[in-house]
Image (tube, grey):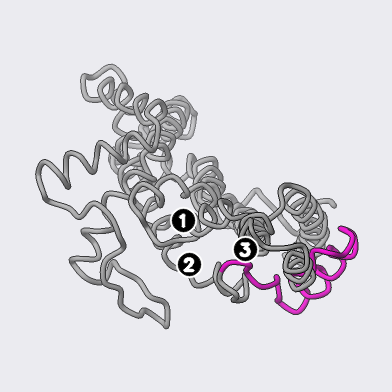
Amino acid sequence: MLVFIIRRLLQSVVVLLVMSLLVFVGVYAIGNPIDMLISPDADQLDRARTIAAFGLDKPLWQQYLLFLKNALSGDMGRSFAFSAPALTLVIERMPATMELAVSAMVLSILLGLPLGLWAGLRPDGLAGKTIMAVSILGFSLPTFWVGLMLIMIFAVQLGWLPSSGRGPTQLLLGVPVSFLSLDGLRHLLMPAFNLALFNIALVIRLTRAGAQEALLQDYVKFARAKGLRNSRIIGVHVLKNILIPIVTVIALQFGSVIAFAIVTESVFAWPGMGKLIIDSIRILDRPVIVAYLMVIVVIFIVINLVVDVAYSLLDPRVRLADTKG
């Protein structure tokens, strides 16, 4: 296991280097932030001073080497718009996005697993068919439209939930979170459900397909022949054996949820990384954009490593220590 983890960490360093080059070139080769940062009436001398102040007068390869040197010490550059360290701006917004993403994945598991099991164990029943029909909507409906409909119904028409913002926060292990208060939960509920809708439908379909396949296996038939309770058969022999693909998808989707929470954060004015990156793209705040993308890359690398380790815990047949290169 230790050898596998060390090997993956070394591979991750290579991935980070390659991604840093792609991200840097892709972001810095597009547009000119100077056009948005200074007045159109500024003379050439003012423009030259501003360009030199931001280091944009150097060739692209020199800018990348300087960025790489500073990034090794945790410096991703300073924001053009906020005059603050770009990485600090992203990290400050991360708790809000992580809280939203974790809440969305918890909802996906709490709703998707039991509904998927129900549909898989009783596929011909009215409830099973209804669950599968509703799951199609989860795949089909656009996230921004669902968010607007949630606001129209629960905030405007019924007045049950607030339409925007994060609500009051409290510190939990030094991290500001909003779910510890009732008002914070009310602010969190709609954006979390909106972000979770696609994943709820995905977990339902994965669980249903896995349950139907597991029910046909010999070990389930043998367990029934032994007279085991149906609840034990489902909980031990069915659910445990279908968790591996579900864990994989949930873990990988967690990274996607973090990376693509932009729409939900914009609709509900949630003060997370997604809203920050949208504001930064509008003014071509390159350091913030690069810092955000690199943070997302690191999150995906960590998630993939955790998934591989979780494999060995869920399935004894998986031996990470014996995995080849």
Of the numbered discs 3 and 1, the one sitting upstream in the chain is 1
Residue 61 painted magenta: yes
Tag on residue 109? none
- As shown in the figure, which amino acid type bears the numbered disc 2? Arg
The boundaries of the magenta stretch are 54-81
The answer to whether 12 appears left or right of 133 in the picture is right
Residue hosting label 3 = 288
Helix, strand or loop at label 1? It is: helix
Percent of width and height locating residue 260: 51, 47
- As shown in the figure, which amino acid type bears the numbered disc 3? Val
Of the numbered discs 2 and 3, the one sitting upstream in the chain is 2
Is 212 rendered above or below residue 293? Answer: above
Of the numbered discs 1 and 2, the one sitting upstream in the chain is 2
Of badges 1 and 2, nearer the viewer stands 1
Q: What is the residue that sits farthest to the top in this orientation?
A: 124
**Quadrant assignment for the N terminus:** bottom right
Of badges 2 and 3, nearer the viewer stands 3
Helix, strand or loop at label 3? It is: helix
Q: Nearer the viewer, residue 42 or 80?
A: 42
Q: Which residue is pictured at 47% across the width and 27% down the height?
A: 213
Q: Label 2 near label 1: C-beta < 8 Å?
A: yes
Q: Which residue is pictured at 39% across the width and 57% down the height?
A: 100
Tag on residue 275? 1
Q: Which residue is pictured at 43% across the width and 41% down the height?
A: 237
Residue hosting label 2 = 93
Q: Is residue 63 visible to us here?
A: yes
